[in-house]
Image (cartoon, helix red, strand yellow):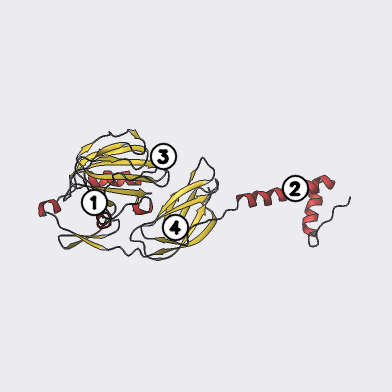
Amino acid sequence: MPLHIARGSSTRLAWLIGHTSGTYGLVFYYMRWILIVVAYAASAQTLDLPKTVRQGGTLRIHGTAAALSARMDDRNIRLFPQTAGGSLGLMPVPADEEPGDYKVELLDSNNAVVAATTVTVIDARFRKQNVVIQQNIAELKPSPGESETSAAFRKNVSEVRYWSDPVDLPVRGCMTSPFGVQRYLNGKPTGDIHGGLDQRSPTGTPIHAVEGGVVKIVREWNLHGRTVGVDHGQGLESMYLHMSKFAVTEGATVKKGDVIGYVGSTGRSTAPHLHWTLYVNSVPVNPLEWVQVKPCSIANATKVPNKH
């Protein structure tokens, strides 16, 4: 059976005549090209993301096993192989990210782009919040090493994933302060954005780990008070502040729901409550994308009166 060569392939045919022998050589050559095309098609990827994300949000980025990292603007994150197949990474969108269009790209082992799409960051319209606090508490300074230890904890990215989606609430109290509000102390702007979520809860209430993980911080600090930090793996971490007592030690492995401490009012705090933060690849993100909790005003309005 004759082997037909496409028109315009004279140069390739001359090369084949010089480097292959007979029909078997031609077949081998074309099979090789077919395999290259098939391999390329198999490695082709798409990037399926929401068209918009709010400031403080988290993008869950899925790729094939060949995708090792993702990039959004100048931020790079690792993607991790998942037991169900493919890879997954968490891309944080900072609370102060400028609204607008951003390119999100999947990268392979050579840092080459294998898929890309555009996501629009929209203004979350965070409010302002004034906190009235005693002057001596307002003037508290960080303990030696407090800021450095907290920063090192946030930057850590570990291999083992303990978390699932969604996470659990650490306490059942209503929300007194949401993520992202611009903080004022005694009427003066601090320049800070509230990086976590505050829940009202009485002193001594057990605080539960929102997910499983490894306890990396158990410290008593001036600003944060008694603090626990848990690494949930693959870029997700949580931190719990102002505790009255600890219930874990550094290095311990905890499961979702385990008691890690008790509500208090230590550090820069005006009353018993829990301030807790979710970090995604070192950036504080909005916990309300991971859990559901009612503001205290709504919770009080919908509370059923005790008839007894």
Q: Position of residue 25 (x, y in %)?
A: 80, 46
Of label 2 and label 4, which has the lower sequence position? Answer: 2
Q: Position of residue 23 (x, y in %)?
A: 84, 47
**Residue lying furthest front:** 308
Of label 3 and label 1, which has the lower sequence position? Answer: 3
Q: Residues within 10 Å of mark 1 (few under 14, many from 20)?
A: few
- Mark 3 vs mark 1: give the one in front: 1
Q: Is residue 35 visible?
A: yes
Return the mark for residue 31: 2
Q: Position of residue 32 (x, y in %)?
A: 72, 47
Identity, as a three-letter code, of the amino acid under mark 3: Tyr
Which residue is the site of mark 1? 305
The Cα atoms of the two marked residues, 4 and 3, are separated by 25 Å
Of label 2 and label 1, which has the lower sequence position? Answer: 2
Q: Nearer the viewer, residue 71 or 117?
A: 117
The Cα atoms of the two marked residues, 3 and 1, are separated by 39 Å
Identity, as a three-letter code, of the amino acid under mark 4: Met
Which residue is the site of mark 4? 72
- Mark 2 vs mark 4: give the one in front: 4
Q: Is residue 239 left or right of residue 23?
A: left
**Secondary structure of the residue carrying numbered label 2:** helix
Identity, as a three-letter code, of the amino acid under mark 2: Met
Of label 3 and label 2, which has the lower sequence position? Answer: 2
Q: Residues within 10 Å of mark 4 (few under 14, many from 20)?
A: some
Cβ atoms at labels 2 and 1 below 8 Å apart: no
Cβ atoms at labels 4 and 1 below 8 Å apart: no
Q: Residues within 10 Å of mark 3 (few under 14, many from 20)?
A: some
**Residue lying furthest bottom:** 100
Which residue is the site of mark 3? 162
